[in-house]
Amino acid sequence: MPEFAFPDGFLWGSATSAHQVEGDNVHSDWWAWEQAGRVKEPSGLACDHYRRFAQDFDLAAELGHNAHRFSVEWSRLEPAEGRWDEAALAHYVEVVRALRARRLEPIVTLHHFTTPQWFALRGGWVRPDSVEAFARYVRRVAAALGDSVRYWVTINEPMVYVRMHYIQGLGPPGARDLPQALRVIEHLIRAHAAAYRVLHGARRGPGPAPQVSVAHHAPAFGPCRRWWPPDRWMAARTDRVFNWALLEALTEGRWVVPGVGKWRIPEAAATLDYVGVNFYGRQFIQWAPAAGAWPGASCDLGHHPREVTERTSYGWDVHPASFVQVLSRIGRMGRPILVTENGTYMQDDARRWDFILRHVQAMARAFQQGARIIGYCYWSLLDNFEWADGFGPRFGLAEVDYATQRRTIRDSGRRYAEICRANRVEIGDMEIGDSH
């Protein structure tokens, strides 16, 4: 059967985030949000990864990975404004050493949905001085880790973060305020630009230059009713605002929200060394004038029985052809792509493996169409705390028994390991569907 061989040095791995796996993240805004009863269940000890990271990295190495994406928790390093916990910083130094000792390339995320509680209480990302507060934190991390880390993600899913926390009210501060959301996006763009310069300026050794990006959530958007022009217009507008405006800001230094305004942010121009892409599926968009300046509403997938033939246990559409489409479009920007997240919650692990295989095959097809992809991180290495949904959804290559903290590698994890070790995938029956 024909195979596609990925380039030498291709990064194969998985991803985690601090709050979702470390446990006892008591100084973060999300911890306070959980204690107030705003979620299905609190994160608590989570996967106890803060103490078990070496064991978990052994597991990743056993699975043939050569890279691992994780996040540094700002609230551990700076639990109170201006007070730095040197032991916490030393912990993350040891985390990077542990990865390097196992020949796992660290991919370090600096903000993954959580902020210190003191930062949130004083106004969070709404305040203009939030940019300097973030840059101050990044300077600390860069001074400690800079020569040991090549790949950096400044902010995970900026658009999802803003939608979830400032439009839908599903995370702290629980806002539903569009003008506030727009200010937060502007400040996140400026914070990324500041972090980009800090990370590039902190390099002291002779090794490769830092590679800095965001992890950009990039769904494929289509109209709910193709025959109705307002749905087609709204889907295109959603794609423009959610997918492309941010990337344009970080390449050209201008952020445009159609019908709302244009912002010149010159310091953000040319601040993507690669494009981090998080992909989970396709969404159908319908006309929703009440959405105002924010993109229109997603319609129920149940309205699309002919198009949506497969769903995850989360209810999300499974559509690898859309992955090809997204990677190929982003590839035309001319920058390398690192798939920073792609994964699924499937109660049937055989379906999880099928999801992984077909999305890796889709990635191979995007390669053939000209996309320059440098790595793939499955979400997630471990079952973990999935924010408002608690511990119910299980994405891990390894199952976690939360009562005992025992890890058990799933068959899907072992089969993904075969791809990682071989650095190639069979493509003879590349059944990924069409892109419509």
Image (cartoon, rainbow, N blue to C red):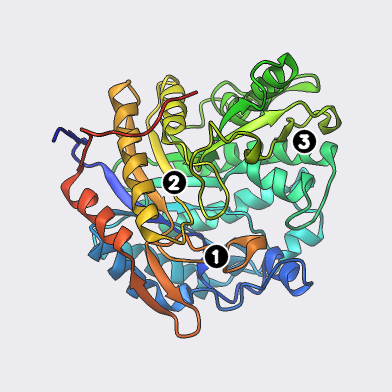
Q: Amino acid at mark 1?
A: Gln
Question: The residue tagged with tag 2: helix, strand or loop?
Answer: strand
Question: The residue tagged with tag 3: helix, strand or loop?
Answer: helix
Q: Which tag, 3 or 1, sits closer to the chain's start? A: 1
Left-right relation of 401 to 38 = left
Q: Which tag, 3 or 2, sits closer to the chain's start? A: 3
Q: Which residue is mark 1?
A: 20
Does any portion of residue 155 appear in the rendered image? yes
Does any portion of residue 100 appear in the rendered image? no
Disc 1 to disc 2, how far (Cα)?
A: 16 Å
Q: Which residue is mark 3?
A: 182
Q: Which tag, 1 or 2, sits closer to the chain's start? A: 1
Judge whether 43 appears above or below 195 on screen.
below
Viewer-proximal residue among 185 and 208: 185
The N terminus lies in which quarter of the figure?
top left
As drawn, the residue found furthest toward the left would be 1
Disc number for residue 180: none
Left-right relation of 206 to 196 = left
* Quarter occupied by residue 63: bottom left
Viewer-proximal residue among 272 and 423: 423
Q: Nearer the viewer, mark 1 or mark 2?
A: 2
- Residue 195: % across, % down: 55, 43
Q: Residue at x 51, y 71 (%)?
A: 22
Q: Amino acid at mark 2?
A: Asn
Q: Amino acid at mark 3?
A: Leu
